[in-house]
Image: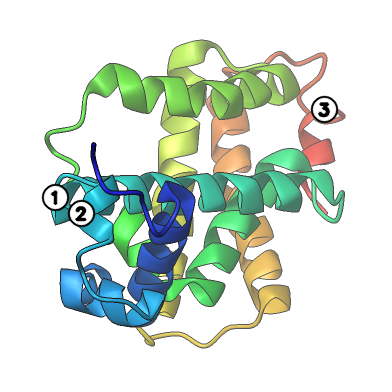
Amino acid sequence: MPPKAKFAREEIVRAALEIVRKKGPKGLTARALGVELGSSTRPIFTVFQSMEEVEQEAFKAADALYESRLKEEMSKGEYPPYKASGMGYIRFAREEGELFKWLFMRDRSQEKIDTQEKQLKPILDLLQKNMGLEAERAYRFHMEMWIFVHGIATMIVTGYLNWDMKIVSGVLTDAYCGLRSRYLEEGKRDAGNSDGEADKEIR
């Protein structure tokens, strides 16, 4: 009969997440996890097969935390939904630096393209609805805008910038307005809703 687990799976994952929050993923070792739990390392391996498995579960927990924070930002109504997604991303970088680096400053070259596309679909649908863009141009618009958003987030998380969220909001509006103007000049938007609908995304 296998030994009874001293800690629940969720407790171990929460402890692992706390370690990454404070020390980054390199700090997540069996020894550090035992210290965080106030135990030896033995109870960890009653529940998990390896530290790699612990890390995978902690990564999922970090991603779930990010998604929760993003939904919270978008549901507050402080900003229009598309802008709120960018603000939420940058706020997460400010408040959860090590988790942000783990999630978004890693090598993603081996990820499946269809997984990335599924994650983007709600945002692209929003752009198509609000700006009258076809799918391909909505994707291009978003990628141009998101390069800018990610740049701000990485400069904040690496200490290059120390902007508060009010400044970030203004800068994102400037970037959005500039990009929107260029798309309008190209004449690819529906003239009937280009002004009224797109303006909903600026505040």
Q: Are marks 1 and 3 in contact (CB under 8 Å)?
A: no
Q: Residue at x 74, y 40 (%)?
A: 81
Q: Residue at x 14, y 50 (%)?
A: 50
Q: Which mark is residue 45?
A: 2
- Residue 60: give x, y in percent of width and height: 39, 44
In the picture provided, is 161 more to the left or to the right than 47?
Answer: right
Q: Are marks 1 and 2 in contact (CB under 8 Å)?
A: yes
Alpha carbon separation for disc pair 1 and 2: 7 Å
- Residue 154: give x, y in percent of width and height: 37, 69
Alpha carbon separation for disc pair 2 and 3: 55 Å
- Residue 168: give x, y in percent of width and height: 63, 71
Q: Residue at x 28, y 75 (%)?
A: 34
Which residue corresponds to mark 1?
A: 50
Q: Amino acid at mark 3?
A: Glu
Q: Nearer the viewer, residue 183 or 144?
A: 144
Q: Amino acid at mark 2?
A: Phe
Q: Amino acid at mark 1?
A: Ser
User: Does residue 64 appear anywhere in the picture?
Assistant: yes
Looking at the image, is mark 2 or mark 3 earlier in the sequence?
2
Q: Nearer the viewer, residue 184 or 197?
A: 197
Instruction: From this view, report whether residue 113 is shown above or below residue 65.
Output: above
Which residue corresponds to mark 3?
A: 197
